[in-house]
Amino acid sequence: MFLVKFINHITTKPLLKKFSYLFIFLVLFSFSKADAQQQLATQIQIPAYSNMTVGQIFQVLNEKHGTLFSFNSNILQADSVIQLSAYKGSLYGFLDHTLGKEYSFKEIGKHIIIQFTPQRMAVDVEVQSQDKNKVVITGYIKNIRTNTPISDASIFDRDALLSTLTDKNGYFELDVKKKISLIAVNVSKAMFRDTSVLVIFPIDTEVGSKRRKFGYFTEYEQDNGFYRSFFGRVFLSPAQSIQNMNLGGLFLYSPYQISMTPGLSSHGFIRSQIVNKFSINILGGSTAGVKGLEIGGVFNLNQYDMEGLQLVGGFNVVGGDVNGVQVAGISNQVFGDVKGVQLTGGLNKADTVKGVQISGIGNMMKESAGATQLAGGFNHSKGTVSNQVAGIANIGNKVKGIQLAGLVNIADSSDYPIGLLNLIKNGEKSISIAIDQDAYLGVQFRSGGRVLYSILGAHASLKDDNTARYAFEAGLGAVFLHGNRFMLRAEISSRNQFTDKFKLLSNNHSSFRLIPELRLNKKLSVFVAPSFNYVSKEDDAVTQAGKTLWKVWGRDKNRNSLFGGGAVGLMLRL
């Protein structure tokens, strides 16, 4: 209360008014610095180590004091070996002594953020104007060493959700609502040490207010291509990309945001650093992330993570991870990991998926942590995937479960592929030639996994009196026994039959056969395959009273018939 009364008193004196802001800034800035360095002020004791890596040192500090470290591996390599002398003192002193003066350290939550900041900046801030409705804070940012202006530095206040960038002269203006009593002007610029200036305005109420919750994304410095993506290039301005680079993984929480477009948002320029519980984008919007619900007309852009439910008529784009459900009319694209469900009429794309991808056109991912892909068109996985079901094609590295496609399956390893053609690197690929009980000579191609495989075949009759001179076959087989000299297969297949002029006949030949196979060497084997068959009557067969007759057992061209048969042949492994 004494400080508040003193502030109100001195700011009523015209001659002292200009000096009050500087005085207040110095007092409050010293308070905030002392309050903000709790972990860095922790007293530690480290024995001497020889040939120890930076990563191992951080691991020791984590085990002893529970401290987490985040840093860019491009500027500080975890496998760098250093000689460490015994140390007793504050954590800040240890880091400063070990890593050097070119690094700065910032506490956010449980994390110590290590940044490479060889440059220093000077901040000159003053209140340019005051009226009933707003206050304008202006200032210049300069390089201390060269005394030159610093352009594209981020100026922001995390409590008031205000942000801007300096121009080429290092100048900035920050419009502030009069009702705000305290502004923390934070300045960030890549390669420069962060600087903060606190400004308090003379009002008739007490200064204290509930501070806005903020956080830090620990993996923000991993370049995931969000700003280089199509939506990042088209809908995010260069200024937003610069602010992201300056502020790094810092984000703030807000209960809601509303936007017409990314440039017309209730959060203004700082929108891309805010995580909202509820976000609605009339056409489209850009935020740091969502922890709740986001609804968009055409597109939703999240720089970091999305937790909860995301609905859009067009595109969802998330630069970090997704934990929840994404529903999009055209596309869901996630540059990180997905735990949950992606549902779209078009294309789903993610890094690692633990859950389900469902799409009308296609699903794409790099790796699976127990995922199933369902698509009307195609599925593609560069790593391991649990199951893939597609109307046209599936492509995977290692498929643990079923791989079902209307046309083709491709994988390095897939034991249960079902499709017309299966190109499995460690699976079945063979050609056989055989003759069956009806004197049809057939060539069959088998392709698939170590258990399931598909069959494609062509047959020609060796008899001139057969109405069906040719037949094309498709089927599914399974390997039950796989020995060095003996194998046992079971197959089901169906033949479409044609005349000598390749006119399709209506009668169909379906078979179930067992294939005991004796391997002569690694490539060649011989087999005799008993079969159980069903054949419908031929097109010109005579019926009785317009009804098709059945023959329970035995081949009869004028009737639908069930009969036994067999085939003998040779099989060559490719």
Image (cartoon, helix red, strand yellow):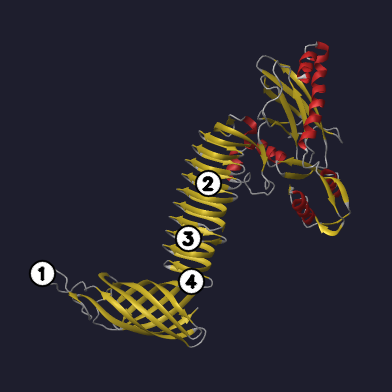
Spatial CA span between label 4 and label 2: 34 Å
Q: State which quadrant residue 377 falls in.
A: bottom left
- Helix, strand or loop at disc 3? strand
- The residue shown at (63%, 46%) is 228
Q: Measured from the top left, where is residue 97 in percent x and y?
A: 87, 47
Q: Nearer the viewer, mark 1 or mark 3?
A: 3
Q: Residues within 10 Å of mark 3 (few under 14, many from 20)?
A: many
Q: Give the number of the disc on residue 378.
A: none
Tell me the distance, in whole angstroms, between the alpha carbons under discs 2 and 1: 63 Å
Secondary structure of the residue carrying numbered label 4:
loop
Please say whether residue 71 is visible from this viewpoint: no
Residue 186 placement: quadrant: top right
Amino acid type at mark 4: Gly
Residue lying farthest bottom? Answer: 520
SS at badge 1:
loop
Image mark for residue 449? 4
Marks 4/1 in contact by CB < 8 Å: the verdict is no
**On the image, numbered disc 3 is attached to which residue?**
388
Instruction: Work out whether 85 lies above or below 484.
Output: above
- Residue, disc 2: 324
Q: Earlier in the sequence, mark 2 or mark 3?
A: 2
Query: Mark 4 or mark 1: which is in front?
Result: 4
Pointer 2 with pointer 1, Cβ within 8 A: no
**Amino acid type of the residue tagged 1 in the rendering:** Ala
Q: Earlier in the sequence, mark 4 or mark 3?
A: 3
The residue sitting at 85% across, 32% down in the picture is 147
Q: Which residue is mark 1?
A: 545
Q: Do labels 2 and 3 touch, CB within 8 Å? A: no
Three-letter residue code for mark 2: Gly
Residue 116 vs residue 159, the one in the foreground: 159
